[in-house]
Structures are given as C-alpha cells and as structure tokens.
Image: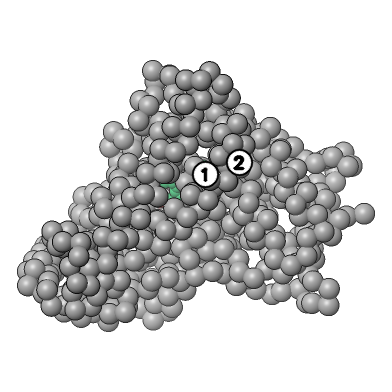
Amino acid sequence: MDHLLESPWLVTSATVATLATLYIATASGDAKKAGTRSLYELPGPPRQFLLGSAAHFPKDSWYEVFSKWREEYGDVIFVPIATMRTVIIHSLSDAEELLNKRANVWSGRPNNRMVADHMGLSWSLLLTSPGKSFNEQRSIFRKVLGAQAIIQYDPLVSVEARNLVESLRDSVGNPSQTIQAIDAPLTIKMTYGSKIYEEHGKELADVNMEALEFITWCFSQVWIVNILPISRLLPSWFPGLKYPAFAKKGRELVSAIRNRGFDLVKTEIERGSVDLSIVSKHIHESEFDPDVLQNATAMMYLGGVDTISTALSSFFCHMLMFPDVQKQIQAEVDSEVTSGELPTSKQAVAMKYLGVAWKESLRLAPPFPTSVPHVNTSDDVFKGYYIPKGTLLITNVIQRAQELSRIESVAFGFGRRLCPGRHLADRVGLTLAACALATYDIVPLEGEDIPTRIEFTKTQTRRPLDVKCRFVSRG
Ligand code: HEM
C-alpha cells in the first residue's frame, strides 16, 4: 500500500463498497468477448482483490522496475490498479503494431483526472486525445517547429552554442547543471522573445522547472481521484485525503505556465516594444485561434525544458565512455569547419558520423525510456486478448531496442503522438554537440578510469547522475 499516496485506510475502508462494485463490473465485463481472452489472464505483478496491483506499482524508476517485471513475466504484462487497466509492452514490433499501424485506435491519452481536471492541465497537447484541439495544436507545432521551419531559429541556437562552449571552458566535475541551463534560454527566447527572456528569464525558467518536476511527479503517482473519481466529492479537510493540497499547488504552477509568458508578450505588443517570437509573430494571424496558440506555445515552453539538455548530457557521457567515437566525430568536425570557428547548425546536421552517434546515444539512453502512456479510444484485440477502450499502454522498449542491430530511435515516441519537438531537439542537440567537440576533449577526471556505464536518476525524465569528467581545450 506504500505505493498509494493517499492514506491506505481511506482507500480500503471508506471506498470499499464503491470499488467492489466497479471492480467486479470492470473485471467481469472485460472477462470474455467471443473467442478472446481477458487481460486478467496476462501475467503481471501480484494482484489483490479490489486494488489490483496498486501495492506494487512503482513511484519512480519505472524503467528499472518494468524491465525486472519483463524478466519475470514476459513481454506483455497486465497491471490493473483498481479499475484502471494498464498494459506494459517491451517489444518494439508490438509497439509499432499498436501505436503506428493501429494509430487510429491507440493515440488517446489517459484521462488523468488529478493532472487534467484538478490541476487544470487539460488544455495541454500532452493530455489531449485526438480531436479538434489536438489537430489544431499539432498543426501549430508543424508550422513553427517543422523540419524546415526550425531553420529560422539557427541564430538563436548559435548564441546558445557559444554560451555553452564558454561555460564548459575548463569544466572539471559534473557538468550537468551547466548543460541543463541551455534549455530555458533557448525555449523562452524562441517562444516569447529575447527581450522577455532578458527581463523575466530567471522567473520564467524557475517556474517552468518547478512545474515540470511537479507535473511529471504527479503523473507517476497513484491518486485516489484517478482510481475512484467519486472521491472528488469528499471535502478537502477529509482525514487522510492528500490530493487537494497537491492539486492546489499544481493549479498555481499550471496557470503560471500557460499565462505568464503569453501575457508578458501581449503587454509588450500593447506598448509597441515587442521583438520577434513565435507568439508575437502568430498572435494576430487569423489562421490561429489565440487560445490554441497560447496552449501550444505553453507546451513548447514546458516541453522544451529538460529534454534537449538531458539528451546532450547522455551524449557527452557516451563520448567519455567511447573515446574512439569522440575522436572520429572530432575528425569529421575538423574536416568540415574552418579551424578556430564553431560549427553552424547547417554544418552540424550534415555531419554523418555525428548524426549516427547522436541517434545511437538517444537509442541507448532516451530521456523518457517509458515514453508517455497512450490509451485506446475504441476496443481492440491484441494477441488474442480483448482490450477494452480506455486501457493504458506503456511502452518500455529500450531493453529490446538494444538487441536490434539497426539504428532505431524510439526516443521520440510513436505514431500520431510522435514528439512534435523532435526536429528542433535534433538540430539543437547536434549543433551543441558539434560545437563542444570542436572545442574540447571530454576526458575522465585526472587519475580516474573511463567509466563503463552511466548511472541515471530515478525520475521520469531519466538524466545521467553524478557524471564526472573534464572538458579540456583542444590544442
Ligand atoms: C531530445 C529531446 C526530446 C525527447 C527525447 C522527446 C521525447 C518525447 C516523447 C517520448 C514524447 C511522447 C510521444 C508519445 O506519446 O508517443 C514526447 C511528446 C511531446 N514532446 Fe517531446 N521530446 C524532446 C524534445 C521536445 C521539445 C524540444 C519540445 C518542444 C519544444 C517537445 C514537445 C513535446 C510535446 C508538446 C509532446 C506531446 C505530443 C502529444 O502528446 O501529441 N519535445 N516527446
């Protein structure tokens, strides 16, 4: 029961009757459809009457726990949590079958009532199931972050590349904080403008980081309002009820994410002193509904934080671990770029060896190894099992991806939900990687051996932990 955030007795005593009715209805309703098997026949961690596997569902380290489960239970695992059904798959071909080939069925998102309704994040693309708002927001992403569109941000990327190179100069020890600092300026300048960043950058970056950590943490918890929606009727002072206090904090952060940057740009426009940004460029375009633009840009601001820097940190770790690869990339950089200059984005994305190494690093250490859960928006049958509409699907394919011989990056997800920031992430990541390797050798601390493995944080965004290296200027 340790895995449920709310007080155990609240779930087990005050709600037993409701749960029992729902559980029996769900389990028996799922049990059989002609010629199919029930999900409850799939292997998975131990289940208890009413609560299912809630007691075993991990609060963190999803990748590690699910990978252990795979060894014990196989590639397809069923984890019911009270009335919430979760299927975890580990094979890339199963993921491609469901999320790519059957994208019309498997592109929904879970109705996470805690995060969407109680914290007020229902507007975000991340939680929106396919429909009008989903299409409108994804269309904005395509227009402003599509493969060609992102070239317009190259000058911004060059500035951040120079800043990164400067701040890594003679760096000894753990470079994570220096690398993490690249996301906020880039995302905020691109979305809301350089002037807003200069005047409010620190405040916007701090709120964003806090919101991101809080929201991802809330996603990974088992909340009573998610498994027992009727509990929302309990007064917030009800003994043992914890979600209302967390929801209140979440609402404040979510509101800041959606409104603060956007409102600042509107004020600048009214004053006539605004500079170029995605918001200022598109706010008066009839093609875009301002509300949808506000939602999409808030998601860029939120989605851009902690992603590129995490991928880059892992890339630098891989360079430390594989000095021969590092040398080959440096040879490629040296052959393409005039000595003493930093590579441009255009040069970086054209470097073949660097491109392969970047992809490989993302494949071995994706920032979100268990991606974001998808949900089926209509009933489905998979491998003979009947999967009722509304079942959560978690992919944990990186273990198996390592077994594949071809370079296959699943780091950006699948099907219709494929990360809309992927072109930007690749272009920025490659530019920063090329600039860093043009300037420095990444080597172990003096007297230390080359590490043979990377330790990671237990969080949903899996970052390298405790990396120790030196960035030594190349002669
Ligand atoms: C290396 C960097 C990045 C990685 C590895 C990454 C990975 C992912 C993954 C795995 C998903 C879930 C896909 C799925 O559900 O199948 C996702 C969704 C998303 N990403 Fe990224 N991402 C990165 C950078 C970015 C950036 C820079 C932005 C924005 C500027 C962004 C915005 C989003 C958004 C808005 C979604 C939600 C899409 C939806 O639900 O339809 N990401 N990303």
Residue at 50 percent of width and 60 percent of height: 461
Horizontal side of residue 46 vs 68, given as left or right: left
Instruction: Tell me which amino acid carries mark 2.
Output: Leu
Give 301 or 138, whichever is nearer the viewer. 301
Screen quadrant of the C terminus: bottom right
Tell me whether the residue at label 1 lies in contact with that at label 2, contact meaning CB atoms closer than 8 angstroms.
no
Is residue 50 in view from this perspective? yes
Q: Residue at x 20, y 61 (%)?
A: 236
The location of residue 219, given as percent across then percent down, is 36, 60
At which x and y percent is residue 137? Answer: 38, 35
| Residue 410 at x, y percent in the picture | 50, 55
Q: Quadrant of the N terminus?
A: bottom left
The residue under the point 76% across, 49% down is: 165
Q: Residue at x 34, y 34 (%)?
A: 135
Asked whether residue 417 appears in the rendered view, the answer is no
Q: Is residue 200 above or below residue 169?
A: above
Q: How many marks do you count on the picture? A: 2
Residue 446 relative to residue 355: left or right: right
Label 2 residue near ligand 1, CB within 8 Å = no
Mark 1 = which residue?
204
Q: Nearer the viewer, residue 464 or 70?
A: 464
Placement of 195 over or under 210, stated as above or below: above
Labelled disc at residue 186: 2
